[in-house]
Amino acid sequence: MLIGPGFQTYATPTQASSERPSTTQQQDVYAERKDLFHKVSALTGIPWYYLAAVDQYERTLSIAKPKKRPPREGLIGIYFTELEWVGLLNPDTEDRNVKSIAFFEGYGRDGSGDGKADLSNDLDVLFSMASHILAYGNKDDDLRIALWEHYQNTRSVERIEQFAKIYATYNTLNLNDHAFPVPVRSSYSFRSTWGAGRSWGGYRIHEGTDIFAGYGTPVRSTCYGIIEVKGWNPYGGWRIGLRDTQNVYHYYAHLQGFDKNIKEGDVLKPGQVIGWVGSSGYGKPGTSGKFPPHLHYGVYRDNGWTEWSFDPYPLLKRWERSERKASRK
């Protein structure tokens, strides 16, 4: 995995705005966006949560690569270039005529019913992507094939399926709540250690923040996410990796053990116990005690092809403050 600078990890629903919207504004955006998903789902038979997953995956790609694919204005985050929209050989790059766009094999379709395929129209953009997917069918295997043909990347297909499962589980787009990884009323300490040197197994960079706590302190999911990895790693010992709908991978290492009720593919919510603080790792399965008990917590951004670490410390401080404030109410 690559190392990268920290940046705005959890984007606001309206990518075009530089100001963080209020909770009420966010709720309105989610309601309008979900309404679009339901409308296109009714037209195509593609489940709303699958359309939501494609849209959100596209949005995360724009967050990760804003210069290459600028975040789209509006409710829908699906990105098409002008040439993709009108057709690569179309001489009119501003073409909105449905028939000529179809002739030049562009993506553009009319979803709003106004007779135009408008790249700035949310419903047209969503319907166009859905129509492209629907050409392969609307069964699970058909959807996987359509996504692979579009992205030419198995990783993208996996991410969209993960997002879809999360959305289907909670039946909402509003999955922004987070929790500090250990109970804030427990005894723990941490400081910023991301980027420091590590030597076991060869020189490397520390890709996370160490939260020191006693053996058996509960370790909790920080997000709404899906368990992507669970098991032993020579460096991290007993570890769990969760993926959230922002395409951020949350890595929990050196655990004493796992909650017996969770497994790979399960969807979790913030604050749900996943295991306990330990000192496992730096050797063969079962190795423990080579360092004081602590939780190694790391976060990684995925851009569709590679993944890189960024500093989790600012997020941890934010979640800690928020949870302490809520506990005082």
Image: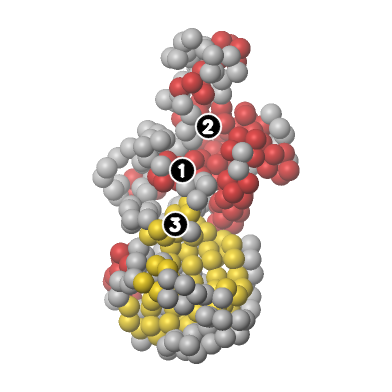
> In terms of image quadrants, where is residue 188?
bottom left
> In terms of image quadrants, where is residue 14?
top left
Task: Give the distance between the C-alpha atoms of the residues marked 3 and 2, in whole angstroms.
Answer: 32 Å
Q: Secondary structure at mark 1?
A: helix
The type of residue carrying mark 3 is Leu
In the displayed orientation, state which residue is furthest to the left: 19
Q: Which residue is mark 1?
A: 61
Point out the tag, 1 or 2, that comes first from the N-terminus. 1
The answer to whether mark 3 and mark 2 are in CB contact below 8 A is: no
Residue drawn where x is 45% and y is 37% of the image: 77
Point out the tag, 3 or 2, that comes first from the N-terminus. 3
Q: Which residue is mark 3?
A: 2
Residue 67, image x, y percentages: 36, 37
Q: Which residue is mark 2?
A: 126
Residue count near mark 1 (Cα–Cα under 10 Å), binned few <14, some 14–19, many ≥20: many
Position of residue 19 in the picture relative to residue 15 (left or right): left
Whether residue 141 is visible to the viewer of this picture, yes or no, is: yes
